[in-house]
């Protein structure tokens, strides 16, 4: 049963870390510990907590390690309190990576997007060099590595990219993400490391996501640019659960899965729905370009079921949260960027 509204950050994080049956079954089928790399970001803390809860629900003894630079002491403390073992580590330090604990399963979440423009060299290093170091450290582990739908080109509205489509990244960030995939692919093929690549767009919760971006603009009476007229989104808790379950389909060479919701959400329609819920008139600027970054996630839905939280419920939760001045992360998704410059 899903609530009609989410009243606090504590309730939100409990919901985001609630494991699905597929996540619990994956924990039950594992034979060792789990390492989450890059666990201090937007998704990592709730994913690590879900991993802990899934193992407990499965009745298995396994350690969950959360690895990050941990710029936030509060994030680290909350993970420790949840029974997750935290490790402060700079993944660019090869020696430090070699000291990380053994694990049968690895969730790779590290990478750079925001601020990539102007820091192109660092973007390539973080997105392509760190994966090589991780693969050398964990050659026999099952690895689930987060990628992005940005590796695809823009497609016409009403059509969505599938996993077998050729990549066509726009801009250095997206090209470096394809580079990250290629590094994992190389080590998977040469070292027989089982890998799943998850091409995600866009994870949404109440503090961050495309719906939050739109809701904040509607609430502030700011005009909505509809040039990029469509997008996909998935509730972050559902994305977390797929990542934990996807260790079971890791293969060499890698399995590739698009990870998003089943709906093509229209910026104009979503903004109007937010306006009705928030009692705001909505103004629009621009003209729909007719193409956008869109992915077809039918393959992942066939494996693990449709997301528990659909677009309408996310819209309702986000509208209520923003109207009550709920906490946000202050980071825009930049989903409307069309030239690849993040």
Image: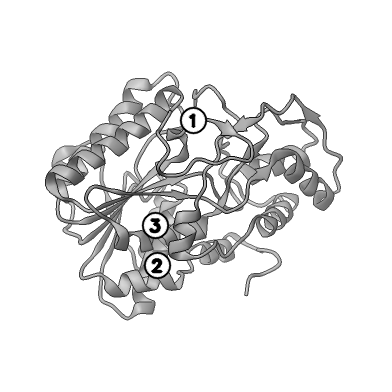
Vertical relation: 335 (above or below) 310: above
According to the picture, the residue beneath numbered tag 3 turns out to be 243
Q: How many marks?
A: 3
Position of residue 117 measured from the top left corner of the image (x, y, whole percent): 45, 21
Q: Mark 3 packing: few (<14 Cα in 10 Å), some, or many (20+)?
A: many
Per the image, label 3 sits on a secondary structure element best described as helix
Position of residue 265 measured from the top left corner of the image (x, y, whole percent): 66, 45
According to the picture, the residue beneath numbered tag 2 turns out to be 82
Per the image, label 1 sits on a secondary structure element best described as loop
Q: Residue at 69%, 64% (x, y): give it.
A: 5
Please tell me which of labels 1 and 3 falls first in the chain. 1
Q: Residue at 32%, 21% (x, y): give it.
A: 121
Q: Nearer the viewer, mark 1 or mark 3?
A: 1
Per the image, label 2 sits on a secondary structure element best described as loop
Which colouring convention does the figure follow?
Answer: one colour
116 or 327, which lies in front?
Answer: 116
Question: Residue 153's mark?
Answer: 1
Q: Are marks 1 and 2 in contact (CB under 8 Å)?
A: no
Left or right relative to 103: residue 75: right
CA–CA distance in space, label 2 to label 3: 19 Å
Vertical relation: 185 (above or below) 101: above
Left or right relative to 241: residue 333: right
Identify the image quadrant of residue 101.
Answer: bottom left
Report if residue 69 is visible in the image: yes
Position of residue 70 measured from the top left corner of the image (x, y, whole percent): 36, 46
Please tell me which of labels 2 and 3 falls first in the chain. 2
Position of residue 145 measured from the top left corner of the image (x, y, whole percent): 33, 48
Q: Quadrant of the N terminus?
A: bottom right
């Amino acid at each position: 049963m899903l609530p009609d509204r989410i009243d606090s950050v504590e309730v939100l994080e409990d919901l985001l870390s609630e494991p699905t049956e597929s996540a619990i079954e994956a924990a039950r089928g594992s034979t060792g510990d789990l390492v989450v790399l890059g666990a201090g970001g937007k998704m990592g803390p709730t994913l690590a907590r879900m991993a802990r809860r899934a193992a407990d629900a499965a009745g298995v003894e396994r350690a969950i390690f959360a690895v990050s630079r941990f710029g936030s002491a509060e994030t680290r403390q909350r993970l420790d309190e949840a029974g997750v073992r935290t490790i402060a580590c700079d993944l660019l330090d090869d020696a430090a990576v070699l000291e990380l604990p053994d694990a049968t399963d690895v969730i790779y979440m590290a990478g750079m997007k925001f601020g990539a423009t102007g820091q192109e060299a660092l973007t390539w290093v973080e997105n392509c060099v760190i994966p090589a170091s991780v693969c050398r450290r964990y050659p026999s582990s099952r690895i689930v590595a987060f990628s992005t739908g940005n590796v695809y080109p823009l497609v016409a509205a009403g059509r969505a990219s599938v996993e077998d489509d050729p990549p066509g990244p726009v801009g250095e960030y997206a090209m470096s993400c394809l580079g990250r995939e290629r590094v994992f692919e190389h080590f998977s093929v040469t070292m027989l490391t089982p890998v799943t690549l998850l091409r995600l767009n866009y994870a949404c919760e109440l503090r961050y996501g495309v719906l939050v971006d739109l809701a904040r603009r509607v609430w502030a009476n700011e005009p909505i640019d509809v040039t990029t007229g469509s997008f996909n989104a998935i509730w972050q808790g559902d994305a977390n659960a797929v990542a934990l379950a996807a260790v079971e389909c890791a293969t060499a060479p890698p399995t590739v899965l698009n990870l998003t919701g089943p709906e093509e959400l229209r910026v104009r329609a979503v903004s109007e729905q937010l306006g009705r819920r928030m009692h705001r008139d909505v103004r629009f600027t621009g003209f729909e370009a007719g193409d956008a970054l869109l992915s077809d996630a039918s393959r992942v839905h066939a494996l693990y079921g449709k997301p528990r939280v659909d677009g309408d419920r996310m819209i309702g939760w986000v509208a209520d949260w923003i109207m009550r001045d709920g906490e946000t992360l202050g980071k825009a998704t930049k989903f409307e960027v069309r030239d690849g410059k993040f």
